[in-house]
């Protein structure tokens, strides 16, 4: 008999988690105004709100933390991190920042001006925020196939080169760079193929533009290239990563994901002029150039994390766990964005709570129901997150309405995954009894999903 698959690590330290009663959860979620961001983490049993900064570090990372050099300028830990980043990405210039959005803030302060257009594939919220707050426009050039949750194609995060070319043909002199997010979080943790990165490069070269990779989950993207794209099966993750970055000019990185640390980020580029332009913003916003918002010990842990997570075994363990959850949902017939992505399952709430009108935010209702069922916290990536149209002030119901269940790295076992799957099945089985959603009682003008207050209908 073939031996079953198992994790490429064993557990050395544990953190207790606690179950609660349905009655307690009813009280807590009411006090949280039916917004899971307002819950205390202690009121949650299994936390799938994000995979960002919620992973478990390895013994080697913890050991490296003891080697942190906390010198203000020129710390050994900075050079260790920089050398690791240069080895993995090929980018020579590195600016550390405290997290991914800070990297965006520093680099975009230099690059993005009012009236600019920044094309890309489903810019992440903070990326879009840093473009729009500078009165520029983020143009989404993701392939149309990404919007059909049931369509199975291997690289659903891809950029549509024709859409990209159109933006450049119309606004070439107002495009400071192209940004490709790997993996495409918003489209469901969907990967971008090497072939697509090459196509983007070709369009960029034609218009003499530079390309940035938003690389929060670049290692997961490399895993999908290895396992799904022709010609890459025999290449190592490190070789694939190097090739991906060879097609770009620079990167912004939220190290809280594929860097396997709880806090951290950086900018890396091959261009001295970008480095020189961004430098002063780093000092102004983040800190001196050799720490940029990070402790020496955190830079040490990140250097080790980047190396660990560009090894196949670690990634295989991770992605197989996300796939395991997908297989369980398949057993129960629960619809989600297919094929399953790298860091999360995006459950298609519109197809489950079919009796809840759009105006009552089905995915938010599903998020609340799953919490009530078993204390599992996912989050809505749907109509509430989409905010209102800045001109008409109407809710935007044009996109997808999803419940995102993120899987933190190296944190939960497949027993926890089983609990998530069965809890969701229980909600799914009584979906026809759920005929109403939620109503907004208070909302912020921007990024409302973090603080929105709701009532149950
Ligand atoms: N880019 C992508 C693709 C992201 O997913 C995130 C964060 C960022 C940039 C910003 O990085 O949080 O370190 O400032 N995503 C988290 C999430 C918050 O839950 O998907 P950050």
Image (spheres, grey):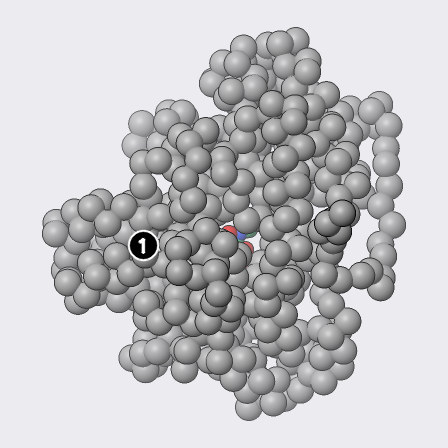
Residue at 86% x, 33% y: name it.
Answer: 20
Residue 260, horizontal then vertical, whole percent: 63, 64
Residue 337, horizontal then vertical, whole percent: 50, 34
Give the class, few, some or many, for how many residues have Cα within 10 Å of label 1's Cα (few <14, many ≥20): some
Q: Is residue 452 left or right of residue 297?
A: left
366 versus 254 height, above or below: above
Of residues 220 and 207, the one nearer the viewer is: 220
Residue at 32% x, 82% y: name it.
Answer: 272
Q: Is residue 384 left or right of residue 27?
A: left
Q: Is residue 368 left or right of residue 237?
A: right
Residue 452 visible in the picture: no
133 versus 71 height, above or below: above
Residue 207, horizontal then vertical, whole percent: 15, 62
Residue at 72% x, 65% y: name it.
Answer: 57
Q: Which residue is mark 1?
A: 196
398 versus 302 height, above or below: above
């Amino acid at each position: 008999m073939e031996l079953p698959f198992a994790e490429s690590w064993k557990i050395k330290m544990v953190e207790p988690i606690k179950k609660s009663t349905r009655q307690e959860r009813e009280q807590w979620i009411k006090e949280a105004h039916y917004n899971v961001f307002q819950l205390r983490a202690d009121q949650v049993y299994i936390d799938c709100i994000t995979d960002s900064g919620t992973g478990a570090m390895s013994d080697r990372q913890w050991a490296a933390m003891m080697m942190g050099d906390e010198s203000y300028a020129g710390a050994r830990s900075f050079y260790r991190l920089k050398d690791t980043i240069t080895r993995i990405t090929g980018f020579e210039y590195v600016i550390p920042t405290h997290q991914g959005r800070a990297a965006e803030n520093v680099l975009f302060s230099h690059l993005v001006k009012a009236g600019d257009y920044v094309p890309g594939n489903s810019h992440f919220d903070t990326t879009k925020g840093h473009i729009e707050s500078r009165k520029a426009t983020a143009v989404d050039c993701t392939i149309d196939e990404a919007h059909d949750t049931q369509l199975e194609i291997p690289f659903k995060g891809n950029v549509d080169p024709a859409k990209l070319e159109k933006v450049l043909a119309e606004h070439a002199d107002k495009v400071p760079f192209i940004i490709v997010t790997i993996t495409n979080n918003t489209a469901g943790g969907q990967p971008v193929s090497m072939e697509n990165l090459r196509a983007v490069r070709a369009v960029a070269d034609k218009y003499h533009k530079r390309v940035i990779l938003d690389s929060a989950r670049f290692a997961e993207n490399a895993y999908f290239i290895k396992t799904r794209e022709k010609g890459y099966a025999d290449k190592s993750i490190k070789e694939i990563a190097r090739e991906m970055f060879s097609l770009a000019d620079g990167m912004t990185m939220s190290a809280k994901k594929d860097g396997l640390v709880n806090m951290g980020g950086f900018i890396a580029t091959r261009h001295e002029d970008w480095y020189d332009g961004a430098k002063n913003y780093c000092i102004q916003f983040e800190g001196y150039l050799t720490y940029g918002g990070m402790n020496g010990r955190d830079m040490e842990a990140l250097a080790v994390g980047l190396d660990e997570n560009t090894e196949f075994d670690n990634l295989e363990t991770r992605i197989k766990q996300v796939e395991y959850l997908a297989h369980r949902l398949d057993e129960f017939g629960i619809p989600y964005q297919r094929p399953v992505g790298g860091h999360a399952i995006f459950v298609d709430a519109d197809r489950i709570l079919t009796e809840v009108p759009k105006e009552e935010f089905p995915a938010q209702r599903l998020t609340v129901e799953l919490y009530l069922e078993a204390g599992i916290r996912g989050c809505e990536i749907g109509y509430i997150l989409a905010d209102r149209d800045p001109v008409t002030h109407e809710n935007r119901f044009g996109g997808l309405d999803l419940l995102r269940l993120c899987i933190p790295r190296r944190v939960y076992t497949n027993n926890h995954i089983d609990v998530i799957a069965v809890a969701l099945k229980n909600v799914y089985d009584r979906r026809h009894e759920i005929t109403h959603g939620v109503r907004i009682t208070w909302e912020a003008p921007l990024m409302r999903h973090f603080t929105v207050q709701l009532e149950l209908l």
